[in-house]
Amino acid sequence: HRDLHSFPTRRSSDLIEEPQRLLRDDMRDTVQASTLLTIIGNGANKLSEIANRAGKDSSTISEPLSKLREFGYVSREVPFGESPKKSI
């Protein structure tokens, strides 16, 4: 029988910061997630527009945007009548 107090534990604040840490680790070699989130937060909603504001090619930011969707930071919504290829 092992005492539960002997197991190393993390502070609750460490657990709160875990999603950001995972995102940062997963995206360290690409466009910074915070940059993309800022651009999107400032109203850019098309891949080409986000890439232009970031100063990158659309192909460069496709993967980071997919990661942001995967982690739940952004979602993809296609307005009625628009091409799914043009909306993030």
Image (cartoon, rainbow, N blue to C red):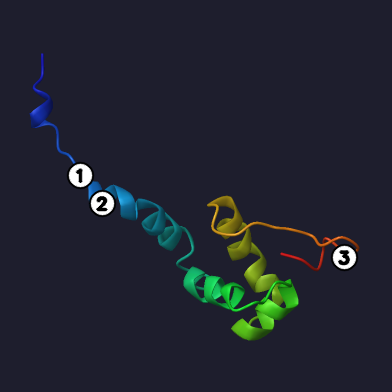
At label 2, which amino acid type do we have? Answer: Asp
The vertical placement of 78 against 18, above or below, is below
73 displayed left or right of 87: left
72 displayed left or right of 15: right
Check contact, mark 1 vs mark 3: CB within 8 A.
Answer: no
Q: Secondary structure at mark 1?
A: loop
Which residue is identified by label 3?
82
Which residue is identified by label 2?
14
The quarter of the rendered structure image containing the C terminus is bottom right
The vertical placement of 42 against 79, above or below, is below
Estimate how packed mark 2 is, as few (under 14), some (14 to 19) or many (20 or more) residues with alpha carbons within 10 Å.
few
Judged from this view, the residue extending furthest toward the top is: 1
Q: Residue at x 12, y 25 (%)?
A: 4
54 displayed left or right of 11: right
Q: Position of residue 36 (x, y in %)?
A: 56, 73
Q: Secondary structure at mark 2?
A: helix
Q: Residue at x 59, y 79 (%)?
A: 42
At label 1, which amino acid type do we have? Answer: Arg
Q: Secondary structure at mark 3?
A: loop
The quarter of the rendered structure image containing the N terminus is top left
Distance from disc 2 to disc 1, alpha carbons, whole Å, reads: 6 Å
Of callouts 1 and 3, which one flags the residue occurring earlier in the amino acid sequence?
1
Of callouts 3 and 2, which one flags the residue occurring earlier in the amino acid sequence?
2
Q: Position of residue 84 (x, y in %)?
A: 83, 60
The vertical placement of 77 against 36, above or below, is above
Which residue is identified by label 1?
10
Q: Position of residue 27 (x, y in %)?
A: 49, 63
Q: Position of residue 59 (x, y in %)?
A: 70, 71
Q: Residue 25 appears in which quarter of the rendering?
A: bottom left
Between circles 3 and 2, the one closer to the viewer is 3
